[in-house]
Amino acid sequence: MKTIIVDPFPRKMELIFKSSKLKLLKKKFNIINAPKENKLKFYKQNIPNADFIIGQPDLPKSILILGKKLKAIFNVESNFMDNMDYDYCFNNNIYVLSTAPVFAQSVAEIAIGLTISLKREIHKAHLDFIQKKEKYGLESNKRSSLLLNNKIGIVGFGDLAKSLKPMLVPYTSDFLVYDPWLPNKLIEDNGCRPASLSKIFKNCEVIYILTTITKKNKNMIDEKLLRLMKKDACLIILSRANVINFQDLNKILKKGKIKVATDVFPQEPVPKNDPIRRQKNILFSSHRAGALNSVFFEMGEIVYEDLNLITKGLPS
């Protein structure tokens, strides 16, 4: 029987596995639950017996080298964090597998909702009505506009962007993409045009931030780029918050020139006195875009399937 170290924090196994699937997992595999504290001691003692790890714990080379049987690490947080020796894993045939693709569809759908609400100011009209100061007809649409035929900018062309782009095709065929990790041909094969950040921020009516965080792109979206945006252009921030310089974003929002929607923040929960809460031209979503029960259970399904495939010696 293969052995799994279970250490999914900040997730819980009950979140990502249906009860029936969790029972199967416990029946087919020897499960060792990691403690909340003294993890270094725990891994030194237990990783020599582990075939798999579900989670994304700190795994320096000094620990990984003890895992002679280790075949795969399942990252269920879905962000590749700088806390394990990936080079050692790759050089020693230890798969590091991310469950991030499960979030693509759900986040893409909420992206459409945020976009339409920004363009047509649905959220503002709703709030006005509640506050008994609603405006009717054209009076309520002075800063509204159509999404149809807009030029769309996409920063980061991974799984999320590839799910979102087909949803936008009924509205437009004009897509600019910035992703320095991808060859231009791949971007073009997906019906988009490669572009620089400055070109995207200067020319697009709607811009999506969909990139992961790296050592080089922290605070990449700064005041200089934000100032390039057209009046009433929409910026939708869906991953990751540290790509945006939020201090600069606050400065730009005060001017009232652009519209912003964000599902992520540099600090979560957002402090009650954070100045971002006082901004007017922003639509808030509390990091909920991908958080659906069905999505987390899908995460468990792909982990379970891959565990079985690797146990059978696949891929060979």
Image (cartoon, helix red, strand yellow):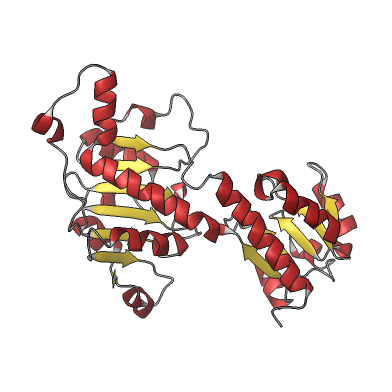
Is residue 209 shown left or right of residue 294?
A: left
Q: Residue at x 29, y 33 (%)?
A: 123
**Quarter-of-image position of residue 254:** top left
Vertical comparison of 294 with 44: above or below: above
Q: How many marks?
A: 0
Question: Residue 87, position in %: x, y?
Answer: 66, 71
Give 5 or 315, whichever is nearer the viewer: 315
Residue furthest to the top: 132
Q: Residue at x 83, y 54 (%)?
A: 26
Residue furthest to the bottom: 316
Vertical comparison of 36 with 72: above or below: above
Vertical comparison of 297 with 66: above or below: above
Question: Residue 159, position in %: x, y?
Answer: 46, 63
Q: Residue at x 42, y 29 (%)?
A: 274
Q: Is residue 297 visible?
A: yes
The quadrant of the image that shows the N terminus is bottom right
Question: Residue 292, position in %: x, y?
Answer: 54, 45
Give 248 or 272, whichever is nearer the viewer: 272
